[in-house]
Amino acid sequence: MVDARLYQARQGRAFSALERGTAARVATSDPAPAADPLVMGRIEIPRLGISAIVREGDDDGTLAVAVGHIPGTAGPGELGNMALAGHRDSFFRALEGIRLHDSIEFRTAGRRYRYLVDSTEVVEPEETRVLDPTGSAVLTLVTCYPFQWVGHAPRRFIVRARRDPS
């Protein structure tokens, strides 16, 4: 938890500096935080209070400190299915309260993409169809389920959202 909070704070400051287009120093005793080259952006779900740095990868090290972009899925702004994974006991805990039409924002250093939730479902871990490519801009969020499960949860909770054309 401590590593995750430190990583999110440092990379959040570095990402904010990138968004502002500056190399501004943070007014602390730390030097300006170096941007992790694997950081893709930030996901925000305002109604649920979710805001987390997104990093390329879905390995244990990545998911311990960030939301992970699942390799082989579309990237920000691309047509297709951009899939992100996060632990249910950290970054995606609040997904338990997600509702249809909730707004999800994905920010890169230069762009903002808004998605609207159009479905949720619970699947078995082997059901990888949720990661299949799509012909339109879709965001898929994956976390373990049930949310209150202690230890390795037996299923996956899936949120599917379509990019808002406006």
Image: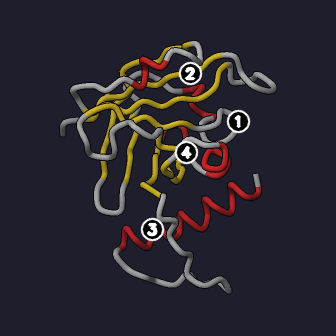
Residue 11 or 99: which is nearer the viewer? 11
Q: Amino acid under label 1?
A: Asp
The tag earlier along the polypeptide, 2 or 1, is 1
- SS for tag 1? loop
Mark 3–mark 2 Cα distance, whole angstroms, equals 30 Å
Which residue in the protein does label 4 denote?
67
Mark 1–mark 4 Cα distance, whole angstroms, equals 12 Å
Q: Amino acid under label 2?
A: Phe
Mark 2–mark 1 Cα distance, whole angstroms, equals 13 Å
Q: Amino acid under label 4?
A: Val
Which residue in the protein does label 2 denote?
157
Vertically, is 77 above or below 15?
above
Question: Quarter-wise, where is residue 100 in the image?
Answer: top left
The tag earlier along the polypeptide, 1 or 4, is 4
The tag earlier along the polypeptide, 4 or 3, is 3
Kindly report which numbered mark, 1 or 4, lies closer to the viewer in this rendering: 4
Vertically, is 48 above or below 64?
above
What is the crowding at mark 4: few (fewer than 14 residues within 10 Å), some, or many (at least 20)? many
Q: Quadrant of the C terminus?
A: top left
Query: Which residue is located at x 58 percent, y 13 percent?
Result: 124
**Residue furthest right in the image:** 150
Query: Which residue is located at x 21 percent, y 26 percent?
Result: 135
Query: Which residue is located at x 31 percent, y 41 percent?
Result: 114
Q: Amino acid under label 3?
A: Ser
Which residue in the protein does label 3 denote?
16
- SS for tag 3? helix
What is the crowding at mark 2: few (fewer than 14 residues within 10 Å), some, or many (at least 20)? many
Mark 4–mark 3 Cα distance, whole angstroms, equals 17 Å
Mark 2–mark 4 Cα distance, whole angstroms, equals 15 Å
The tag earlier along the polypeptide, 3 or 2, is 3
Which residue in the protein does label 1 denote?
89
Q: Residue 48's x, y, as percent?
A: 54, 37
